[in-house]
Image (cartoon, rainbow, N blue to C red):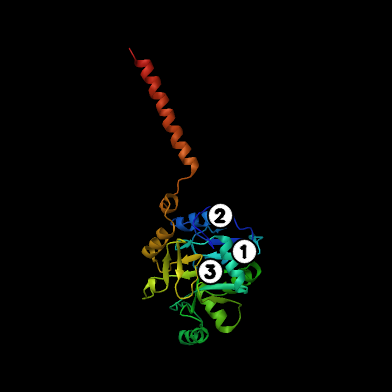
Amino acid sequence: GTLMSYNYPKEPRLQLITVMSREVTNYQKWQVSAERMGYDYIIMGRDKKWDGWKTKMSGMRDGLLASDKPYAVLTDATDVFFAGCATELLEQFIEMNINTVVGGEKYMYYRDGNFSQKDVKEFFDGIKKSDQAYPNGGFMMGKRDALIKLMEHNLQHKDDQAACMEGMFTGSIDLHIDYETKVMANLPNYAPFDYSHNMVFDEERCRYRNKITGNYPCVFHFPGHNDSVMDDFYHHIFSDSEMMNTKVIVPASAVWTVLGIFIAFVILLLVWIALNWR
């Protein structure tokens, strides 16, 4: 498993894809943790304005089409970060022996659907293998070709999460829920449960462990603007200064520009002193 030594090499078999329209700015935890954990990522949609969930789904599809890697992971950005390296995530997925997986959560959030919510809920309650019974579209992973088919299916719907639910409900898509948080964990703010009931912090590995299943999720998603819990989890896992300081990321070019201006100012000041010294 991943140890918190950071700076993992990029996993050549796995493509990380997210969609961020030009309005999005608060994605630093996603970006910094992805870079340190060895994820080769593509950010789609930076030149576009958000125009509903189809913006996300079409961006994901286009990112998959642009990638030549055999596996991909599709995530949200502003409420997601990575606790396990890309190779660990991929190996955990391969062990599951499935084509695609979606994160599960304890409470169903079904919007813009075409079926009765009662019927959909009864279906998922009937097949569940744990309390993480309902799909959440903030994380999907799988073989690239299978994910392309999934995105084409999802684009026929108004909402990506409803698309996943309805595809499983009707049997029209091949998608499995991560019931055991083997690869990822959803921690929403709209679910009234105690987070410590599921996740405990392992001081030795500097990772959160699901104390029911024993698994260490590689990806954490905090839907419903669960910012305070996301901050707590992030800062427990990543304690060094670079990982903690995710409010502002200053490019190296900007540092050199400021340094150059300072040096020029010092030189001008020395010249002025020399010319005016009596």
Viewer-nearest of labels 1 and 3? 3
Residue sitting nearer the eye, 218 or 108: 218
Sequence-earlier tag: 1 or 2: 2
CA distance for labels 1 and 3: 20 Å
The amino acid type found where label 3 is placed reads Val
Q: Which mark is residue 183?
A: 3
Sequence-earlier tag: 3 or 2: 2
The amino acid type found where label 1 is placed reads Leu
Residue drawn where x is 53% and y is 54% of the image:
35
Sort mark 2 into few (<14), some (14-19) or many (20+) by Cα contacts within 10 Å. Answer: some
- Residue 150 point in image, percent of width and height: 60, 72
- Residue 95 point in image, percent of width and height: 61, 71
Q: Relative to 152, is 84 above or below? A: above
Q: Which mark is residue 96?
A: none
The amino acid type found where label 2 is placed reads Tyr
Q: Are marks 3 and 2 in contact (CB under 8 Å)?
A: no
Residue drawn where x is 45% and y is 46% of the image:
250
Residue sitting nearer the eye, 155 or 254: 254
Residue sitting nearer the eye, 267 or 235: 235
Which residue corresponds to mark 1? 64
Q: Relative to 180, is 82 above or below? A: above
Q: Residue furthest left?
A: 278
Please state, as top left, top right, bottom left or bottom right, where the C terminus lies in the image.
Answer: top left
Secondary structure at badge 1 equals: helix
Q: Are marks 1 and 3 in contact (CB under 8 Å)?
A: no
Which residue corresponds to mark 2? 8
Residue drawn where x is 66% and y is 69% of the image:
145
Viewer-nearest of labels 1 and 2? 2
Sort mark 1 into few (<14), some (14-19) or many (20+) by Cα contacts within 10 Å. Answer: many
Secondary structure at badge 3 equals: loop
Secondary structure at badge 2 equals: loop
Residue sitting nearer the eye, 218 or 215: 215
